Amino acid sequence: MDAHLAHSLSSPTSPCDDMLKNISSLEAIQLCDREGNKSQDSGIAEMEELAVPHNIKISNITCDSFKISWSMDPKYKDRITHYFIDLNKKETKNSNKFKHKDVPTKLVAKAVPLPMTVRGHWFLSPRTEYTVAVQTASKQGDGDYTVSDWSEVVEFCTADYSKVHLTQLMEKAEVISGRMLKFSVFYRNQHREYFDYVREHEEQMMQASIKDNSGSHGSPISGKLQGIFFSCNTEFNTGKPPHDSPYGRYRYQIPASKLFNQNTNLYFGDFYCMYTAYHYIILVIAPMGSEGDEFCKQRLPQLNIVDNKFLTCTEEDGRLVYHHAQDAILEIIYTDPVDLSLGSVAEISGHQLMSLSTANAKKDPSCKTCNISAGR
């Protein structure tokens, strides 16, 4: 057991470090396994009567912390000196059987008033299912521990990034965004069949769909927000969209003012990379008062449309002028249906580069540029 894991436990009434003082040789402690087999290590004594935790309750769940409490017979309370907590990622049917299993996290804490906070971004990930069980323990004079049986196993799922975490991510994105370049159109690359289907079956209205799981694992928009994906990046030397496309040989272009104006709100959604030197920033444009706007208002940092580091809409001489960040690839999600007749569809002159697609792309968890300490 790594000694630093012990510092992940804290109490509302006791600072983390104070609570864990005088825990000796954490690495030597061997916990009982969940099947009830007692450790043969000399650090765990034969089990005497100790209160077995029951009625385990998990509350105040965030992307990298939770509170845990339980019930136990009060007559044993004075004998309990420590809690042992067994925390594991829940295995699913889709788990890769050939992948090394995650090392179970065994936590040790001094007995403190409940509920107790478990916090640690190095072993808790956002949006992840976990199982947890608890033992009570009594430290003896010779350093050995007497332990109870394990409690029942309970399951819980950690939360998405909060606005606070997304603001931290946004601040990191601002550092690399670079200078602003002018642009005039949003564009959407797709296969010809897509646009044919929209014309024939959707009355020319491109419909919003659920965002995929690309980007940060803790992003609150993945698998939840409905929208239509657009791009706006331009080539530096021409000021126009690039000739190539990662998603299809046909491109729909629409004047920027049709999607982004004083009647829309702009939100920061995510910042990530895919083991590459360049980075992606996800922004959400939502018509004011729309369902998408209400969704984003509760979950995402809102940007000033005339003054931010990523995408701006300003007025000059009575006309709207648009700029985008040069040094990041912007992925724009528009939350309402879009009428094809507001723009035009044409075949691109360049190549279809499927290798650049970000569909369900996994974020590089080791990148120091686009990760925060609250999980990956």
Image: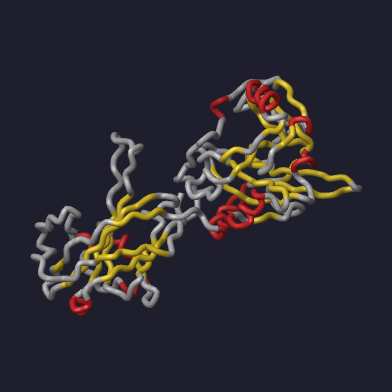
| Residue 41 place in picture, x, y as percent | 11, 59
Residue 106 in view, yes or no: no
Task: Looking at the picture, tell me which residue is in the foreground, 357 or 28.
Answer: 357
What's the image's color scheme? secondary structure
Q: Residue at x 77, y 39 (%)?
A: 256
Side of 88 where 50 appears, left or right: left
Placement of 228 over or under 158, stated as above or below: above
* Residue 338 occupies quadrant: top right
Question: Compared to 368, does 347 lie above or below?
Answer: above
| Residue 254 showing in the rendered view | yes
Q: Is residue 364 left or right of residue 250?
A: left
Residue 13: quadrant of the picture: bottom left
* Residue at the spot 34% in from the left edge and 42% down from the top edge: 92
| Circle count | 0
Going 58% across and 55% down the picture, which residue do you hit?
299
Answer above or below: position of 63 versus 320: below
- Residue in the image at 57% along x and 40% along y: 210
Q: Position of residue 222 (x, y in %)?
A: 53, 44
Q: Position of residue 1 (x, y in %)?
A: 24, 57
Q: Where residue 9 sits: x, y (%)?
A: 34, 66
